[in-house]
Amino acid sequence: MNIKQRIIGLLSEFEKGKYSNILLNEYFSKNNLSKGERGFITEVFYGVIRNDIYLNYQLEKRTKSIKKSWIKNLLKISIYQATFMDSDDKGIAWEATELAKKKFGVPVGKFVNGVIRSYLRDKDEEINNLKSEDKLDILYSYPRWFYEKIKKEYQENTESVMISLKKIPYMSIRVNTLKYSEKEFEELLKSLKIDIIKKLDTIYYIDSGVVLHTAEFKEGKIIAQDGSSYLAAKILNPLPDEKVVDTCSAPGSKTAVLAELMNNSGEIYALDIHQHKIKIIEENLKKLGITNVKPIKLDARKLKEQGVKFDKILVDAPCSGYGVLRKKPEALYNKNMVNVKELSSLQYEILESAAATLKTGGELVYSTCTIFSEENTDNIIKFLNNHKNFSVLKFNLPENVNGHFDSVGGFLIDYTEEILDNFYIIKLRKDFE
């Protein structure tokens, strides 16, 4: 099967409501493809989703309507290649025309050829016009409200932020030190001819997802996890024999980091509001060989009602997810500022409930995988104003992690970071009751 036909099929499945990352991982596990083929499919599949607003804008300018989804996706792929990849324009037009002719006949092939050639003639002028007319939201495929919000918060860095969130992500894998070593993992990568892009402690950013289909992954020796979420757990720094709670723990990857740091001793409560996610946590932790965790179905807002006190608490709160758009680009199109404000309120409720269960002298990390102040700095300012018995603790970050500290001492892994997810982390201490 032609590789573009494969991508068209994947886009069709995505349009039916499947999550992009799950869809792609399942496809690769069922199809024997070369490293180059997987790389090309990944880039184009995610690229079309990331740039959907721009691609639709260009098609609407050149066609009245396209009834067949197959043709529309072929055109989107072609325009994406011509705009965002180092591709041969004539080759793009020729291949798309031939694919359309074989599937639907000569007239459809001519239609496809005409649309693509029209775009290729106008491409440079189109891009320049969008920039000069303050339509970066269309050029970089963002809802207008999101663009205005970025402009307000990031001002002269707006375009850099928008470009950053559309970059192609790398696979990130963490070594489970309870079962495996970094040396052993690096030997595995060599045997699979996989390159290391960046290393952060036991987190490896690599240029292939083949490791997800190895025995080492199935046996829990390695786990898929981003460095940002790893850092949130590491910065909490739980000690052996402490009592810890992870308030929003599914699927359990941050809980696993906590367990490793505690040498599988002490006690961790892993909370989630959904029973099916509790089962996922249990399955994942069992595979990783973790035994000091108690998964509990509980709304974290009700934690303070349980009468338990903790030494350390991780509040990785539910958020809008705008810091992980590289990996989940569809999140951009299904939320708005109303959702951001609703999530901000939920985050604050969880934080306040968790804080009430912290022992005097205990420490808490609040984190989100988003970039907006409502869910990050604003929530912390509100919390500190209402809880004078809490203070912000300083913490260190690896030198190869980029971002900035905000006005209250929280760190945002931001658009200046090329590899890790954008992520907000702040550490608090309860000084007195």
Image (cartoon, rainbow, N blue to C red):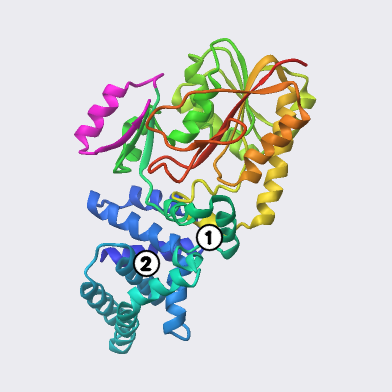
Q: Which mark is residue 306?
A: none
User: Can you tell which quarter of the image residue 300 is in?
Assistant: top right
Check the image and report above or below for 94 versus 265.
below
Tell me if 89 is positioned left or right of 73 in this view: left
Position of the C terminus by quadrant: top right
Image coordinates of residue 383 in percent, x first then y, are 72, 32
As measured in the structure, the alpha-carbon distance from the residue carrying label 1 to the one carrying label 2 is 15 Å
Q: Residues within 10 Å of mark 2 (few under 14, many from 20)?
A: many
Tell me if 196 is positioned left or right of 309 in this view: left
User: Can you tell which quarter of the image residue 116 is in?
Assistant: bottom left
Position of the N terminus by quadrant: bottom left
| Amino acid type indicated by mark 1 | Gly
Q: Residue at x 38, y 65 (%)?
A: 9
Image coordinates of residue 283 in percent, x first then y, are 51, 31
Check the image and report above or below for 151 versus 270.
below
Q: Is residue 147 magenta?
A: no
Secondary structure beneath dot 2 equals helix
Image coordinates of residue 131 in percent, x first then y, are 44, 68
Question: What residue would you read off at disc 1?
Answer: 17
In the image, the segment drawn in magenta is 177-201
Question: What residue would you read off at disc 2?
Answer: 8
Q: Is residue 199 magenta?
A: yes
| Amino acid type indicated by mark 2 | Ile
